[in-house]
Image: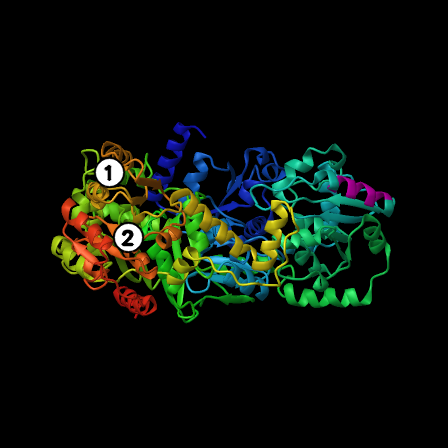
Amino acid sequence: MSRAHRRLVAETVARSRRLPVRKNTVLYEANSGRGAVCNPEAIFRALMAAPDMSHLKHLWVLEEDCLNDPIVAEFEKAKNVRFIEYKSLEYYYALGTAGYLVNNSTFPPELSKRPEQTYINTWHGTPLKRMGYDVEGGGPDTRNIIKNFLAADWILSPNPFTTETMLRKGYRLDGIFRGKIAEVGYPRVDHQFQGPLGRKQTLERLRASGTVVPAGAKIALYAPTWKGASFYDPLDEMASTAEFVTELQERLGPGWRVLLKVHQRVLAQADAHPELRDRLVPNHIPANTALAVSDALITDYSSIFYDYQALERPILFYIPDYDSYSGYRGLYQEPADWPGPIVTTVEAAAEALLAAPDEAVTDRLRAARQTYNPHDDGRASQRVVDLVFRGKDTGGTVISDFSDGRTSLLLYPGGLLPNGITSSCVNMLNSLDFDRFDVSVAYGHSTKPDALSFLSRIDPRIRLLPRIGRFTTGKKPLEQVLGAEFPWGDDARAPRARKDFHDEWRRCFGDARFDHVIDFSGYGPLWAGIFAAAPSGVKSIWQHNDMVSEVSKEINDSTPHERRLKQVFDLYNDFDTVVAVSPSLCELNRAGLQHYAPHTAFTYARNLIDGEAALARARPRFELQRPQAEAPQGADLRTQVRLLTDAYGGEAVAQAVEFETVLSTFLPPSEDTTFLTIGRMSPEKNQARMIRAFAQVHRENPATRLVMVGDGVLRESLRSLVQSLGLGDAVALTGQVSNPFPLYEAADCFVLSSDYEGQPMVILEARVLDLPIVSTRFASVTDALSDDQGLIVDRSDDALAEGMRAYLAGAVPQQAFDWKAYNAQALGEFLSAVRAA
């Protein structure tokens, strides 16, 4: 897509949100426009056949390659039916203005469903494969699915299993979903209940499309699923598929015709094999229409068999790769419970199809039909039309209460940089009682290492709601507008600003409601504005620093945070609490910023520390898992590593390797006294003061060294200062270190030189690891370090140098840190600050 076209799309999306909703227009989309099929097609035909629905206008979304499908010719003379191209400008206009939205999967991220619109998500099958959060690491992959579900007014479900297992648990709709789930059966299954005339018409459609079906032959439909680690990158297994289909046909003989129906994701792969083309059920013929004329179904892990079992005809499962497939994806239902025989060879598949039905298999099939197809009776489409379009209940089960008794929290953790804010957020999240709280984290979707590290560190019970796509205010995305100039001026609370933030909330979270909404970052107007627009819940925003000083902080002769932070301050009045990370910081920020929000409560909640993780990463521990075997003399490195792993476990060995690597790289063994500092290289940290102070100490005592961990805009100027003072051999600038805890363990004294801070995580970490601390006296230091827990000195070169000399003289006080008791108090402060206590 060209830049010019992206701009036109942005303008179209923005304009459509300002136009009236066309309440009698229905927009249908299936499989991202890859055909007028599945549940949307069945609902469309039911509406077209209903005399009392003649006032409706219908818009079908098709990809460019599908605009010549037979359905287009079928309805070319219908004045109330139009076909539009997927992701065209007309498409985006319709997405923002159609009164009804019908989709069997997901609309793109640009969707921001308006209150006047009704969204029916029909989905596309009872799940056999694990879905959503039930897949390991599947949270980020759910991003557009969960977004669409939360926007939906109705989600169709064929059975209680799909409702409970996939929707309420797999996609974690319990607690926050505000729409309705209608267990009424799948409209697409209605196509399977054809009489003799319908069967004849379907066979004619297949033959007209080039699919060869000899007269009188039984049809065995092979419908495998797509395979691969990602839906967006499926494996190409068409060569083996073609081989299977060809050999199966030979074994079955002329009395059968083997046809192939592939998933939309791999249709292009099938088209590339000429030997499959006269067996391929074309995309424009709904799968359930093909099932209606099939005498037997062969599948692997496709949920299509759940639809087919409504007919109680033979089902066969060909799964030669079960061990490998189930291992990386996982299944909800084990093969022993499937309603048909399981085979692993073509020969066995042919024998099973030609054999007489097994009574036990037949009984299993009937039981499965009762469990998974209770509403598949040929009238599901009618029930959907009654419920959604007529407002009548004509059968099925409608569920509208998804509360689970827990208090819901939505939290934005910030930009997920490797800093104290992120560490504090992880510690707080993992300390929550998940039996009491339903926790969601919203963040900007990213596959960068820092983001993946954050996701790997938080409890898997936390619901992930990644923000994808961008909200467009017209020509520019909202984040670009905030970074430059508001179209409504600098007032982030102006009516236009409020509307745009409210629309972006709906785009990200649909109709979801939360009891508590927390901007844990507090540094950016984008998320502050989105969370300020939350339609419900207690709203809190965090302050991790002296925010007045942050506004005026100069970097390279500019004040980069000034405008953005003032926009954040403008939004304080829309929050219930403004939360600083220490009592002193709260008073400092209250004095400087209360005028922005005179009626908002300024309070505090100290940072939490994960003491167990800090100790484990700083001090690898080894516990034998089995008697240790000695490596043979002369054994290679691989053998030695294997024996160590067998004895101590892979994680312990990995921790030991990491520990040794960190120390050998950044802090090799030495008799010198090591001073350590960790922090972003930014003006408020004033590491230049530390370098100058250390220079005084090093001149007097050359057996000293300084290790500085961190990165930032001042790194090169600090490096230059080190060189100019002749400290190149005594001062090490390590850059960012993913695991700095071995450095705490190996260092002798921790030093902080900041002009201002919030509540430094590095002080808490140093205290957990029993490291003596020397710190400058900034406003909030005593909330992390008292005079009997470390040495606090004035903010000058000489005073900091005196503090280092005091350590060398053994005069730095130290006190044991009961971090568990501290955390209990800090967690109570957090719950009180967000009013969840």
Give residue 164's position: percent from left, percent from top. 54, 65
State the image quarter where residue 514 is shown.
bottom left
Find the magenta span and give its range: 241-250
Q: Quadrant of the C terminus?
A: bottom left
Left/right of residue 334 with respect to residue 835 in the rendered view: right
Q: Is residue 353 left or right of residue 837?
A: right
- Residue 231 is left or right of residue 6, and the answer is right
Name the residue tied to disc 2: 750
Q: Mark 1: which secondary structure? A: loop
Left or right of 227, for residue 8: left
Between 608 and 67, the one lying in front of the other is 608
* Amino acid type for the residue under numbered disc 1: Pro
112 is higher (above) or lower (below) than 759: above
Q: Position of residue 519 (x, y in %)?
A: 30, 54
Residue wearing tag 1: 487
> Does 731 appear in magenta?
no
Separation of marks 2 and 1 at Cα, in angstroms: 48 Å
